[in-house]
Image: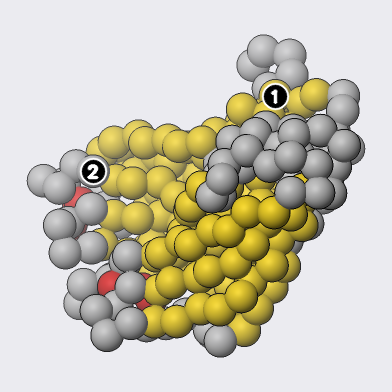
Amino acid sequence: MSVGIITIIIMVSLLFGTNIMIIIIDTATEMAFASSDFLIQKTSSFVDENKIMHVYGEVKNISDKAMINVVVKALFYNANGKALSEFQRSSELRTINPGTISPFEILYINTKTVNSVKDFQLSAVGTPIEKTKPTALKIHSDNSRLDILGFYYINGRIINAGPLKATDSSAIATLYDKDDKVIAIGRALAEPVNLLPDGQAAFGLVATQKLQTYKVKSYSLIADSNEYISLPIFSSK
């Protein structure tokens, strides 16, 4: 392993329903990796109408340094323990400060073998940096709703309280079920995307996974830009 790259692995198992696959990680499994630099938590998964498996969760930075280039990987196995495929995806946040979390979503896109998936391994890798990202953005949730088509909408505002322009600003929503598991993610750019100091921008995001959105009981929002990040806010339905 190269210097500066941190890796953890968590084994998880899948329970199969009619059209939905669910992952369960108990508290003991999570605590076993508490001394590592990342903790993967609140995971769930499901298979959509197009036979794409979505794996959701949060990756928490429990080190004393900020992490960039964080990538979550998944190795998928069949019932005999044979590796089927490996997929990976960057965390939603560009920088994960110490003690903070980022949602993630991994897609299993091999529709021919998705029904053979029985378990998988999750791992996270990242590069530590010396400076944390300033929390100079503020985010507000104005309203949210589930429409009759199954789309979940969240509208709100981002405010730049920092001394520099906030560029490439976006809002990220993490949606949770009654068990506090991540079941969907929504993303949207701010309008305008670049915020001057004391500037304000609106956002409107939508979670489109109709097999998931009816289960939403709460959500969190976080704003991210190249220069700054916000503290997360939480809202119940």
Can I make out residue 196 in this image?
yes
- Please indicate whether residue 161 sits to the left or right of residue 199 in the image: right
Q: Residue at x 29, y 73 (%)?
A: 210
Can I make out residue 98 in this image?
no
Count neighbours of disc 2 (C-alpha within 10 A) and say few if under 14, some if 14 to 19, many if 20 or more: some
Q: Residue at x 45, y 37 (%)?
A: 89
Question: Could you tell me which secondary element the residue under label 1 belongs to?
Answer: strand
Tell me the distance, in whole angstroms, between the alpha carbons under discs 1 and 2: 27 Å
Q: Residue at x 81, y 49 (%)?
A: 198
Q: Residue at x 74, y 49 (%)?
A: 199
Question: Could you tell me which secondary element the residue under label 2 belongs to?
Answer: loop
**The residue under label 2 is which amino acid type?**
Ile
- Please indicate whether residue 46 sits to the left or right of residue 97 in the image: left
Q: Would you name the residue on which mark 2 appears?
A: 109
Q: Quadrant of residue 9?
A: top right
Q: Quadrant of residue 42?
A: bottom right
Q: Quadrant of the C terminus?
A: bottom right
Residue found farthest to the top: 2
